[in-house]
Image (cartoon, rainbow, N blue to C red):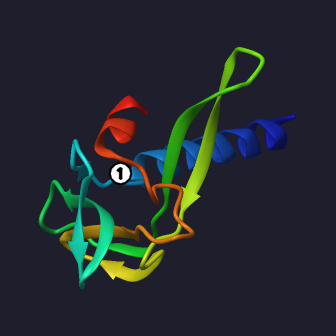
Amino acid sequence: QAIVVQMLLVFVTGVFFTRLSQTKPGIVAAKYAVIGEFNGRPALMVRFLFQQIETVLVDVRFALTYQRQIQLEKGGSFFKNDNLELMRQEANRSRVGGTVVHFIDEDSPLFGQTEEDLKAT
């Protein structure tokens, strides 16, 4: 019984200190995404940066999801989520932040959308 209690104490202590030792980097994303030209092509761009200068992230993966409400022919609606293809979906290291870029081409769910369409979604 003493061995079980000792092992349980070691396990709980390990879990507690593991949770405390994990840092959560403060990442700030832009409040609004911007549509403009990037290398001569129309693109959706979102900027992000770190709150602390000494923050370095390793094996960073980026993802953007476009959510829109679809009206059904028989009434009602549902939300459709589209994963946007990014120019660069991962980085080995990120030190100061950067820009996530989605090119708006024929394969993009944003293709052909007007400013009013985008504001409504």
Quadrant showing the N terminus? top right
Whether residue 26 sits left or right of residue 10 in the image: it is left
User: Against 40, is 19 above or below?
Assistant: above
Asked which quadrant contains residue 60, the reply is bottom left
Q: Please, what is the three-letter code of the amino acid marked with disc 1? A: Lys
Q: Residue visible at 72% across and 14% down?
A: 75
Q: Nearer the viewer, residue 88 or 33?
A: 33
Asked which quadrant contains residue 73, the reply is top right
Mark 1 sits on what residue? 24
Q: Nearer the viewer, residue 60 or 114?
A: 114
Q: Residue visible at 22% across and 42% down?
A: 31
Quadrant showing the C terminus? top left
Give the x, y percent position of residue 49: 20, 60
> Which type of secondary structure does the marked residue at label 1 adopt?
loop
Circle 1 crowding by C-alpha within 10 Å: few under 14, some 14–19, many from 20? few
Give the x, y percent position of residue 53: 12, 65
Asked which quadrant contains residue 88, the reply is bottom left
